[in-house]
Amino acid sequence: MRKYKKLSSLNFSSFIASRITFQSNRTFSKLSVRIAIVGIMLGLSVMILSVAIVKGFKREIQQKVRGFAGDIQITKFDNNFSYENTPFKTDLAFEQKAKALPQITQVMPYATKPAIIKANGEIEGVVLKGVDKSYNWTTFKHTLIAGKVINTADSVAAQKQIMISSYTAARLKLKVGDDFLMYFIQETSRKRKFTIVGIFNVGVEEVDKTFVIGNLSIIQRLNNWEYNQIGGYEVQVADFDKRTTAFDKLNSVLPTTLRAYMIDDTYPTIFEWLKLLDVNTNVMLALMLVVAVINMISALLIMILERTAMIGMMKALGATNWSIQKIFLYNAAYLIGLGLLLGNLMGIGLGVFQHYTHILKLDQESYYMSFVPIELNTLDVVLLNVGTLFLCLLVLLVPSTLVSKISPVKAIQFK
């Protein structure tokens, strides 16, 4: 019997709510309802785009930096923090242990050496980064704007090949196929002639203004190192979000003569900026939710006040306060649902459009990329929808209690 009464009450509240929502002819409440729907639509679309843009920014910038420098770097344990690495011999036992860790995908040797490029009457200070055939070019290839990567498989050809940034190419008026001299300042100054095989544009100032890419054996010969001596290892992890765990696991098998540090420490400015983006996004989400809630509270109060006579009549006929409250909460749920539907269409639609067209451009020198990146995630969209609906209905419970303050006798006489 109790189940039957609950079901009847539910059907009653839902039926009245649908009549109020879809068949109301009250002009003022219609206007307030439309404003509330538009507020929720704009709020949700802004939240979806905010999260998608921030995630897109983080993904693009992380991929660019990771593609160039790896996720973890390993060098000799000493006080040398310059670009002129302290050499150490490759440790095959350590490499095998590191690669056996499920968190680690690649371990790649490298070395760096400062140099000066002279071309077309101009000079430019750079750092030559030497890599070998184990280097992962997959991500780095996306930053190429001309030419190709170094052919590290051909040790003879790779001795003369080099890749420079678009910044350096513009400064020195160079293009793919051009030759230039690079000078290395050491006890006995040396120079080498290189041919440009590729021009890259990482979009990160710390990389584009500093580095050129060559073969590791060039640095080994210039420094008179042995064939198995390197400047360090670059390590790539399976899951970048879990890089701290990978870092701890790697340290457990790291020889005492070596030290490891994460990419966050190599480029602290970039990663601190990315953390600030998360803070800005949280503030934006909070503001949009507040706007949506205020709009819905205003609309609900207006609807209750406009239907004071109806509320009084229902109370006179025996309806409880809660059953009448449910009418307006159902009504609010319908309106919120419509706002969410339109907000999804607008937010996801604009996001997909930007993802494929890149119509919104950015200043690459300031934002590390030339367009607004988008990363839409189904779980993010679902959580934003559920969170908005739940929070709005939860907050609306308070103003809906206004129903209990309405007297049936006075309400029926209300004009």
Image (spheres, rainbow, N blue to C red):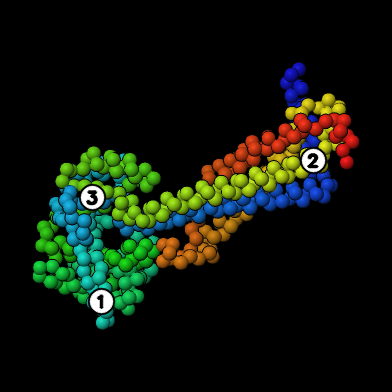
Callout 2 touching callout 1 (CB < 8 Å): no
**Amino acid on which the number 1 mark rests in the picture:** Ile
- Residue 33 position, x and y percent, is 74, 47
Q: Nearer the viewer, mark 2 or mark 1?
A: 2
The residue located at (24%, 62%) in the rendering is 129
Distance in Å between CA atoms under marks 1 and 3: 31 Å
The residue located at (48%, 58%) in the rendering is 373
Apparent side of residue 36 relative to residue 254 in the rendered image (left or right): right
Callout 1 touching callout 3 (CB < 8 Å): no
First-in-chain label (3 vs 2): 3
Label 3: how many residues lie within 10 Å, few (<14), some (14-19) or many (20+)?
Answer: many
The dot on residue 74 is: 3
**Tag 1, which secondary structure?**
strand
The dot on residue 123 is: 1
**Tag 3, which secondary structure?**
strand
**Tag 2, which secondary structure?**
helix
- Residue 169 position, x and y percent, is 32, 74
**Amino acid on which the number 2 mark rests in the picture:** Leu
Q: Nearer the viewer, mark 3 or mark 2?
A: 2
Distance in Å between CA atoms under marks 3 and 2: 69 Å
First-in-chain label (2 vs 1): 1
The residue located at (64%, 47%) in the rendering is 292
Find disc 2 in the rendering and name its residue: 305
- Residue 97 position, x and y percent, is 22, 41
**Amino acid on which the number 3 mark rests in the picture:** Ile
